[in-house]
Amino acid sequence: MEIKYNRSLSGVPENQQQQPLKRITKTYIENRDPVRKNLTMLYNEDTQQINKSMLSSNNDLRRKMLNQERVKRSLNQDVLEDKENVPQHKGLTTKLYTLPQELQNITFKPKFDHTIQENKNLQKFYTDEIFFYLKEQEKKSTPLEFLKNHTIPSNLRAKMIDWMVEVLCSYKCTDQTFFVAVRTLDFYFAKNEKQLEISDLHLCGVTSMFIAAKYEEIHPMKLSVVYEKIGHKKLTTDQIKKRESEILQTIGFDLVGGTLYDMYNLILTNCFIESKLLEKNYKYLKKLCLYLSKMVLYDYEICGKNNYTLLSAALIFVAFKIVEQLETTFNADSQIKDVAQIIQVDQDQLVEVAAKILNLAKNFEKHFPNLENLKKFNGFQLEDDEQ
């Protein structure tokens, strides 16, 4: 290698100017081979380590694959041996796509066939506990005389109840949602120390339905629907949300108290009424109780002065008397004595309230003219026996 200097070394003879370059070249040549050797050794060591790691990973992967193959062969053998003994049950198919073909379409028969009827029977084991728990909570959870501190007249409240029937039925809400909405409204009136005006009724009714739907429905109505379709844009979303918070705080977030719907259903189950009537007559009895329980909530003089247990027993007695005319072997007086004894209510008081309910049923149109949604959305009739 020849290196040319831009300038000569001053004061150094020409024959000595090449000596520093020769020394550098000699030093480079002497150190080049050891450095190269060291680099080569390091490279080889790294390569060997990487190869060992890859080999180990490949071996682990190969072992896992072999184990999986053994498991598959074992499962295949077990399935082939027991294939004829696999129970078949229509409608219950389990597809196991990660297992061999023989396991992909096996059907299993459950140990218990949980039909709706059996679930109803299972509920009977806990009916006593549920009923008496709700009865114990009744003193603090049942709204009574809830309009006495407010200027809202009872006839306007009845009009609100009738509108609730229309709205909740139109939006396919459950019957329980209706009863929770009414209880929430009345409970708010009972617990609110601030005097409410007539102008508050619409907002309270809309918000109570909104709360009940969110609590009971699988797919509750949205706030936008409440604002546009139910409130007809007369209430703002902020008003609804603010009143929702106020109602929940006033009632102490108590939405689990028993409703009239809960109580009469538990009484019918507790007293085994279903086993004492023909199927069609029992269905008719249930429809009667549902209709009467909704009707009772219109009348403040009845629902505002009697607890839900007494109201339930009284409307059941009225329904018993009607069904007794259809099934002569059914003794309404005897059955209502059993009901009064089981739920621990005074029989004379029960009969007195039942008489008021029967009078209301006969004269509903006179008491509440132009309120037709109860009849429109909850009418009923005894179905003829097809056999």
Image (tube, rainbow, N blue to C red):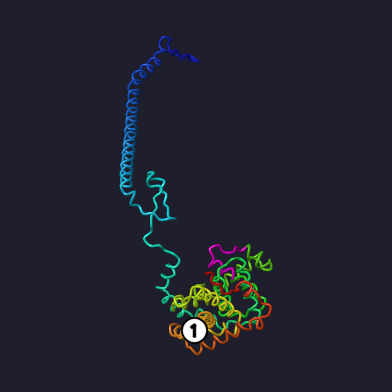
Residue 151 in view here: no
State the image quarter where residue 36 is shown: top left
Is residue 203 toward the left or the right of residue 81 in the image?
A: right
Specify the farthest residue to the top: 15
Q: Give the position of the N terminus as an image quadrant.
A: top left
Q: Secondary structure at mark 1?
A: helix
On screen, residue 200 versus residue 175, left or right, reads right
Find the magenta span and give its range.
Answer: 209-223
Amino acid type, label 1: Ala
Q: Position of residue 350 (x, y in %)?
A: 51, 87
Q: Residue at x 44, y 70 (%)?
A: 120
Question: Among all residues in the image, which is located at the extreme bottom?
Answer: 348
Name the residue at 42% across, 71% down. 123
The overriding secondary structure of the stretch rendered in magenta is: helix
Q: Hey, which quadrant is residue 145 in on the image?
A: bottom right
Which residue is nearer to you in this view: 271 or 252?
A: 271
Count of numbered circles on the image: 1
Asked if residue 179 is positioned above or below residue 114 in the image, the reply reads below
Q: Residues within 10 Å of mark 1 (few under 14, many from 20)?
A: some
User: Is residue 255 highlighted in magenta?
Assistant: no
Does 262 sit above or below residue 366?
above
Question: What residue sits right under mark 1 in the picture?
Answer: 332
Percent position (x, y) of residue 93? 42, 52
**Foreground of the two, 157 or 33:** 157
106 relative to 198 in the view: left or right: left
Residue 331 seen in this snapshot: yes
Residue drawn at (37%, 44%), measured in percent from left and top? Answer: 100
Q: Residue 105's spot in the image, x, y percent?
A: 41, 48
Residue 210 included in the magenta stretch of the image: yes
